[in-house]
Amino acid sequence: MGKPLDGIKVIDLSTFVAAPVTGRFLADLGAEVIKIETASGDGWRITGRGYVPDHFTPEDNPVFDIYNSGKKLISVNLKTKEGKEVFRRLMEDADIFLTNVREDALRRMGVSYEDLKEQYPKLIYAQVTGYGPKGPEAATAAFDTTAFWSRTGFIRDLGVIDEETGAYNPVYPPSGVGDTVTAYLLLSQINAALYQRTSTGRGQRVEASLFHTGIFTMGTMQVTCQRPFGRVYPKERYDHASLAGFYRCSDGEYIFIAAGVPQILIKKLGPAIGIPDLADDPRFATVEARAKYKKEVYAVLKERFLTKTSDEWLAIAKQYDFAATKCQSFADIAEDEQAIANDYVEKVLYPNGNVNTIATPPFHMETVQGLTTRPMPKVGTDTRAVLIAHGYTDEEIDAMKDSGAVFEG
């Protein structure tokens, strides 16, 4: 049995993270994904190297590879007549066109949805936008740090207020997270559109914006903070769920406890921290009481958790069967036993001899096994092979190289 998307062809005209992640996932699921870059390449090649400039190089760039593995890389200048013809030939039997290029630029190149929908009626036209296709911000430049994190309230409202000074510090968002969440959404819509096409014979446009995905992702906060509910952020530590949340331990590490059902948690938490009758304490007994006495509730728990190390508390949490984990650093994941046991990370050997630990694609299907990230080649590496497969001769390709219509890495 083959992979779910065997036989599906994708033309990927995208840069940076959100749409490229979607393309990588489509490739992992079996699709042939042909990524079109300019001669200078996807801007993420340079941005990704900038995270660790003393290590990452054009040949060793895992931050680019994780979002583009499995694709064929070609370089075409879509502003030229010959480049436009290459694009049309690639599109003749394409199932999906994937892009995050802004609408004005798509129209200038003649590859907007309106340009293509009649010529390719079976095409799934998949697009990532920043703030959506309509409204005053439709053409505004956007990244996940602006449209997903900042515009939705996360950076401001979920910032941290220092317990000692009362100073407020906004959260600094990790780049690419909102992009990846948006990619999941776009992938689900693409697959739904492919399924619907089996009965209708027609494609459609599907779109996912960083802003809308962020609004829904922050949905609990968005609902509870509006009138008439009126929750207010940012909050001090004791303002958050008084049983759940993060606690500092004697070794300086933090653990995080999830509430689940608070009345169940408190019956387990009391004996676990050495206060068996905690659930009977009137300050802890009800949601209303814990809200009223939130400073006192937090103070009791805070002091208790400072008496043992994080590992000791995690062992106690397992004993009493409530959800808790250490607040790890990003760096810890590479050595996390649970991640390694489930192949959630892999070690990838690069041609220069470096070994990088990289997250594996989060697919777990009988027909999708052994997915791995491979080091991506240079811009235009597959240009000649892909064009020959689409009917071009070596002489025609050489002529287009000379004119600047295509680039071969």
Image (cartoon, grey):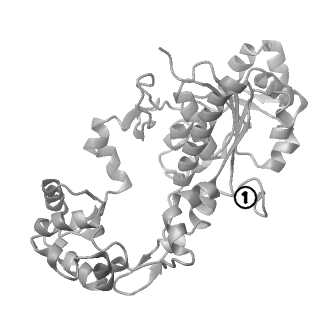
Compare residues 77 and 219 and report the one nearer the observer. 219
Which residue of the protein is positioned furthest toward the right in this rendering?
81
Q: Is residue 236 left or right of residue 341?
A: right
**Classed neighbour count for the residue bearing mark 1: other residues with Cα under 10 Å, few (<14), some (14–19), many (≥20):** few
Quadrant of the image containing the C terminus: top right
x, y percent for residue 310: 19, 62
Above-or-below relation of 58 to 103: above
Residue drawn at (59%, 24%) of the image? 31
Q: Is residue 375 left or right of residue 336?
A: right
x, y percent for residue 79: 86, 37
Q: Is residue 349 left or right of residue 133?
A: left
Residue drawn at (26%, 70%) of the image? 247
Q: Is residue 309 left or right of residue 200?
A: left
Amino acid type at mark 1: Ala
Above-or-below relation of 140 to 407: below
Which residue does the numbered mark 1 point to in the structure image? 141
x, y percent for residue 42: 66, 42
x, y percent for residue 368: 45, 25
Residue drawn at (65%, 26%) of the image? 381
Compare residues 172 and 32 and report the one nearer the observer. 32
Residue drawn at (80%, 39%) of the image? 113
Could you tell me if residue 40 is visible in this image?
Answer: no
Compare residues 90 and 135 and report the one nearer the observer. 135
Which residue of the protein is positioned furthest toward the bottom in this rendering?
165
